Amino acid sequence: MIKKSRVLIALLGGLASLVLVSGAHAGKPGDPVAGEMQAGLCGGCHGFDGNSPDASFPRLAGQYEMYIVKQIRDFQKGHRANNATMAGMAAMVASLQDAKDIGAFFEKQKMAKKPIAKVDKKLAAKGKKLYYNGNPKTGVYGCVNCHGDRGKGKSANISIFPRIGGQHRDYILKQLKDFKSSARANDPAGMMADIAKKLSEKEMTAVSHYLSAQLP
């Protein structure tokens, strides 16, 4: 188990370094003031402050700018194909700078302090255990290794590991299922797919309940 953990840490470090030096986010930083106008495009689904009222659409409030930029670019390039609506909306973002501005605006917003769906405390407790400890029997690593304590993220400078604490329960569950089925495949080195394929539906449900309760 120790050997596997060291391999995971080395892999994560290599991927993070690759993202940091790739230059995809180099140049002028995002401008949240300019982004507020651009983000009006997103408000109908995600909420104008990034707190979407519908669990079909993720909360963007407080999400890392770099992660938002990566998702917009992935939709534009066809690397993320599990949402046709978003592909169409992303096509309307005219430039990388516009994507940065949108990301900067949403990163500055505060996440709402109440989930829109009821959290099952027993399931959340099981999800917490899985989030921190993984499942050694099936080779699932703890989510905390990439997504940080309570899903609050590891670093704003790494575009591949989003903040997931406080995200809508149903949205988290759908993304895990999409990674498992390969409907979503824009995760570097297939990291999320590898984990999701080892999770049972009960485990995915439990961790989604836990994460949706991790509000500010």
Image: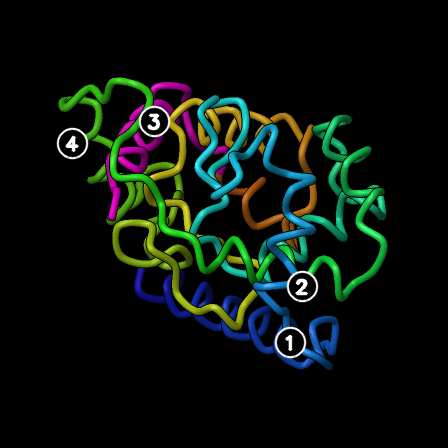
126, above or below 6, in the image = above
First reached walking from the N terminus: tag 3 or tag 2: 2
Q: Looking at numbered disc 4 in the image, what kind of residue is underneath it?
A: Ala
Q: Quadrant of residue 95?
A: bottom right
Q: Which amino acid lies under the numbered mark 1 shown in the image of this protein?
A: Pro
Q: Secondary structure at mark 4?
A: helix
Q: Residue at x 55, y 58 (%)?
A: 105
Looking at the rendered structure, the kind of residue marked 3 is: Glu
Circle 2 residue: 100
Is residue 210 shown left or right of residue 71?
Answer: left
Image position of 193 with respect to 156: above or below: above
| Residue that carries the numbered disc 3 in the rendered image | 203
For the magenta stretch, what is the residue range?
Answer: 196-216
Q: Earlier in the sequence, mark 4 or mark 3?
A: 4
Earlier residue among tags 2 and 4: 2
Residue 213 relative to residue 38: left or right: left
Secondary structure of residue under mark 1: loop
Between label 2 and label 4, give the one nearer the viewer.
Answer: 2
Residue 136 visible (yes or no): no
Q: Is residue 46 left or right of residue 55?
A: right
Q: SS class of the residue under badge 2?
A: helix
Asked if the residues shown at circle 2 and circle 1 are in contact, with their CB atoms under 8 angstroms apart, the answer is: yes
Residue 128 pos. (x, y %): 21, 39
Q: Are marks 1 and 3 in contact (CB under 8 Å)?
A: no
Kindly report the distance in space between the C-alpha atoms of the residues bearing marks 2 and 1: 7 Å
The circle drawn on residue 125 is: 4
Query: Mark number for residue 29?
Result: 1
Quarter of the view holding residue 138:
top left
Three-letter residue code for mark 2? Lys
CA separation in Å, label 2 and label 4? 36 Å
Say whether residue 128 is magenta: no
Instruction: Residue 184: give x, y in percent of width and height.
Output: 67, 34
